Image (tube, rainbow, N blue to C red):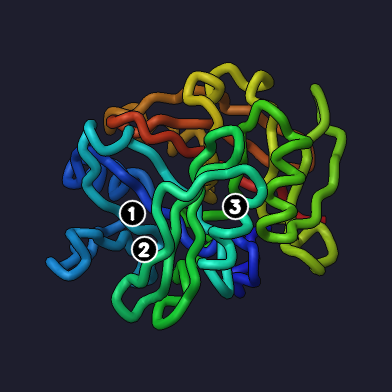
Amino acid sequence: MLDPTFGPGAPNWIDLGTPDLDGATTFYRGLFGWELVPGGPETGGYGMYTLDGRTVAGAMTVTDEQAKPTWSVYFQSPDVDATARAVEAGGGNVPFAPMDVLEYGRMGGFTDPAGAYFGSWQPKQNPGLGATQVPGTLIWSELYTPDVAAAKTFYGSVFGWDSEATDFPGGTYTMVRPAGTKGDEAFFGGLVGLDEVPSEARSGPHWLPYFHVDDVDAVLGDAVRLGGTVTLGPMDVEQVGVMANVDDPYGASFAVIKPAPMG
């Protein structure tokens, strides 16, 4: 699962773009216990969600004219400018050119050749997420793409990811991990054919963050009570866990999972 040391190419940040930051905060506070630390004028209002005092995500207001409500996944880079060049060389685009974020780090926003948006974070004062792999935090990331083979080639060229195809009930799942790492514990995400999951295909190619929970059914009940929508599941996948996909009240998609016991 996701390595909290954030090696090059691993997810090290996520953020939410939403048209109603107060409303979204009410939802995620009720679901995961998050609190919002508002950003000052120097950050353009970009705030931080925290859990027990540790940063678990960023959040910002995004109008309908700017972008649709969404969760974005960022991957660590030692040189975001080089990452941007690799994205373009691989057939992707750079809608947000690399820029410094005060003294916290340097970031860029990209799309892969199929149009899925992702970011890259080059740490300075801010190394990345303050907590992962515990309830209420990021544990996995999944790409929905029309061409898994092409996506594997593209992200391999940009981040050097290693990949491995694993057979699961109903098909094959391609898992990815940072270059040079070994073992199942190094995998942090997967690549899924867009046509395999109709509920996700409606959004087109995109990255989907997974949050660790202790009780999927209870979380889904809370999500609906708070105005969200369950779009898939819950599903119990042997040796993986119980999982489900959710839209928050404004349409930003994410997944939750209670991992199967190790061993």
Q: How many marks?
A: 3
**Residue 240: x, y in percent?**
73, 42
Which residue, as the protein is rendered here, is positioned at the far left? 41
Residue 51 badge: 2
User: Residue at 27% across / 41% down in the picture?
Assistant: 18
Q: Is residue 175 left or right of residue 166?
A: left
Name the image quarter holding residue 146.
top right
Q: Quote the CA–CA distance across marks 2 and 1.
A: 6 Å
**Point 57% across, 25% down: residue:** 233
Q: CA distance from mark 1 to mark 3?
A: 36 Å
SS category of the residue bearing label 3: helix
Label 3 crowd (10 A; few <14 / some 14-19 / many >=20):
many
Q: Could you say where residue 210 lies in the image, as x and y percent from the top left?
A: 54, 45
| Residue depicted at x 24% and y 48% | 25
| Whether residue 100 is situated above or below residue 20 in the rendered picture | below
User: Considering the numbered disc 1 on the image, is that residue within a helix, a strand or a loop?
Assistant: loop
**Which kind of residue does numbered mark 1 sit on?**
Gly
* Image quarter hosting the C terminus: bottom right
Q: Secondary structure at mark 2?
A: strand
Mark 1 = which residue? 33
> Which numbered mark, 1 or 3, is in the foreground of this view?
3
Q: Are marks 2 and 1 in contact (CB under 8 Å)?
A: yes
Q: Is residue 48 left or right of residue 21?
A: right
Question: In this orientation, does residue 147 appear?
Answer: yes
Crowding around mark 2 (Cα neighbors within 10 Å: few <14, some 14 to 19, many 20+) is some
Residue that carries the numbered disc 3 in the rendered image: 87
